[in-house]
Amino acid sequence: MPVRFLKRLGQFRPVIFIATLIALWQVVIRQVPGQLLPGPLQVLRGMRDLLQHGLILKYIVASLFRVTWGFLLALITAVPLGLTVGWYRRGEMALNPLVQLLRPISPLAWIPIAILWFGVGDLSAIFLIFVGCFFPLLLTAMSAVHNIPAVYVNVGRNFGLPPAAFVLRVLYPAVAPRLILASRITLGLAWLVVVAAEMIAVNSGLGFLIIDARNAGNRYDLVVAGMIIIGIIGLLLDQAMRALERVKSFRWGYSEE
Amino acid sequence: MAAEATIPLSSRKAKLQMRDVSFAFERDGKSIPVLDKISLDIGDGEFVCVVGPSGCGKSTLLNVMAGFLSPTTGMVAINGETVRRPDPRRIMVFQDHGVFPWLTVEGNIEFGISGLSTAERKERVAHYVQMVRLQGFEHTYPPDLSGGMKQRLQVARALAMNPDVLYLDEPFGALDAITRVMMRSELLRIWQAERRTIIFVTHDVDEAVQLADRIVVLSSRPARIQDVHSVDIPHPRNISSSGYLQHRDDLLQKIGLAYSA
Amino acid sequence: MTTLAKPSVWEKFFWPLLTAVLLLAAWKYSVKWSGTQVFPSPASVETGMLELLRHHVLWADIADSLRRVAFGFGTAALLGIPLGLVLGWYPAMHQVFNPVIQLLRPISPIAWIPIAIVLFGIGDHAATFLIFLGAFFPIVVACAGGVSGVPVIYRRTARNFGLRPAQILARVVFPAALPQILIGLRIALGIAWLVVVAAEMIAVDSGLGFLVIDSRNSGKRYDLVVAAMLMIGLIGLALDTAFRRLEKIRSVRWGFRDEY
């Protein structure tokens, strides 16, 4: 009996840990009176305020809308380009240095150009996310093709597949696991970028909520509430992408993990 | 030397002909010879094993025959037609990792025959699943199969194409001893039932003596044909009979010579 | 696996050069033909770059950005590596910490700006704190993953040879996990470089990120914007290349067979 009880308790350890952290947070905030930063209770109230106004849902939708379009546009352009270029070694030689040069530029540094081209608004934010996702996806697609085991390519040639069938039935399934893994990581990146972009380039969305709550009246309870919502949604996106990795015909690619 | 090693046509009609085939790899601007003027004829429906010291170029020879590599000089012809690229009429069974992990057993066997009607395809899959004894695993993915099952699946996928030549590149090399013995008798059973031409690369002399009509012994690199050894014992071969042991000892001796050559 | 014959040495330089020339030409002529007054041509970016260099603004900004990255990334590595090792070594600890890490990780470091400003005021410390946040979680996750991914047989071998737990960690688990840890550090350094530029656009008034936003806001000097962006790219590339050098060291090279 006590063993089973301890095991049960073990399952709740993360919960207990989080509860301890929150309690600690409350205690520290209490120690410093006149503090700008909110305690957990204030954050909870802030969260309730946000929900009551209904604004939060609109902002969540706005952020998700931008992420979806920016990410999808990057996916449908970068993956075919990367697969094609990666297949031809000379193509990879030609493109790789350029990609390596552009990749370390923070997507946010593109803000002036985004605003110049697309004005202040959704299109700019989508462009920034696109820029943030495009280069990582391109590099992954290139390296995934590069690293297909030669034996799969040989089997495809042996069975006399025409080019289109070869791409569809050998090339694509062979690179799919790595592409899915990269998509998950890149979607996480897109979520980081959208929040940052919304703090500068637009006036809606979760990032805007945070900067606006601070600038218009130092409502730090709303700042922290917004951050927690951002964390939860990011986590959910990650979990949804992980579900893809469990599809049977992809699962072989993750056996080592 | 090379001319002496040329093998006269066997009594059967020649299926595959190799004439003075040499092959060299390019590495760091240097040319490394692997095959040296190999000439060989293989008859229709014949079971030929290729043996030789490890790293001598057995697999390269098979890859040249199958059209994955082009010979530096010389030519390979099948039914009088020069081999220039891999062809679905001749299927290779690779050493390992050859089955597609993203397809089920059924999907792998169907891989090459998607042009057939559904009914015909189902029938063929069922036939070969049974032949390689994978019943009940039709919807299993390769990571959940044992090594022996994966190799049987590769053989089934190859046979489902109805190829006239089957190339096997040390297909049982990575399997445990018991599974290997079983796989050999399965392959023999299939060969006797369907009478395809089989070219089988192995480093295992016992395997060669048990399976082959003729055994081609290669020298160490660059590989030449050291000897061609006919095994005239009828199947099933009794591995403790004196005739069998005699063949095995002869062969071991020749490979021993190959090592010192 | 090759689809064509092996490329020769000259092609290694020829193809990238060709791309660069084509791209510059496309850029130049699309600026010319579209008749834009704002977007700079390659030539004006070059002039802008030279101007920045002459006035020594660029060097000061580069130094500021690099200093922030060095402190933020350094602190993240110093705290993140030990935490990651511990989490990878004790599954129970991992179970406890993981939900918190997973929840905090998707929050953009930039979203911490209001809090960073309250805690540290506007200035270097706030920016360094943001970089720390951006680099810390990837480092922890990579180290934990590296340690828990060490094959069981290595640990058993170590126990078999009579090593004590501390020795196992130092002599077997750490070297075995090192390739993974280095990859994690390199990726975290890349993130730190992304974050510093973003942070400098909002929270401080120096550095390459500030140069980008300031060039635009004070007089729409898009030639300077693009010049600063190129500089950011070049330095980021240099950091990445320098770090990859570490991965070529003999004792870790086995772990990078098909890393890109």
Image: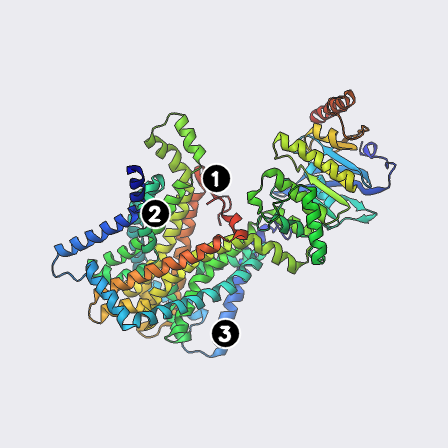
Frontmost residue, C185 versus A236: A236
Q: Chain of mark 1?
A: C
Secondary structure under tag 3 reads: helix
Secondary structure under tag 1 reads: helix
Left or right? Give the position of A238 relative to C75.
right
Residue C207 locus on image (x, y percent): 30, 61
Against A201, residue C136 (above or below) is above
Left or right? Give the position of C248 relative to B180.
left
Check disc 3 and report the residue beneath it. C30
Left or right? Give the position of A71 relative to B226.
left
The residue lying at 67 percent from left, 36 percent from top is: B170
Residue C217 locus on image (x, y percent): 31, 73
Check disc 2 and report the residue beneath it. C140
Secondary structure under tag 2 reads: helix
Residue placed farthest to the front in the image? A1
Q: Chain of mark 2?
A: C
Check disc 1 and report the residue beneath it. C254
Residue B91 locus on image (x, y percent): 71, 46
- Type of residue at label 1? Trp
Left or right? Give the position of C16 relative to B179.
left
- Type of residue at label 3? Ser
Asked if disc 2 and disc 3 are in contact, CB closer than 8 Å, the reply is: no
Residue B71 locus on image (x, y percent): 73, 44
Frontmost residue, C132 versus B73: C132
Frontmost residue, C112 versus C10: C112
Colour mapping? rainbow
The quarter of the displayed image where residue C107 is located: bottom left
Q: CA distance from mark 3 to mark 1?
A: 47 Å
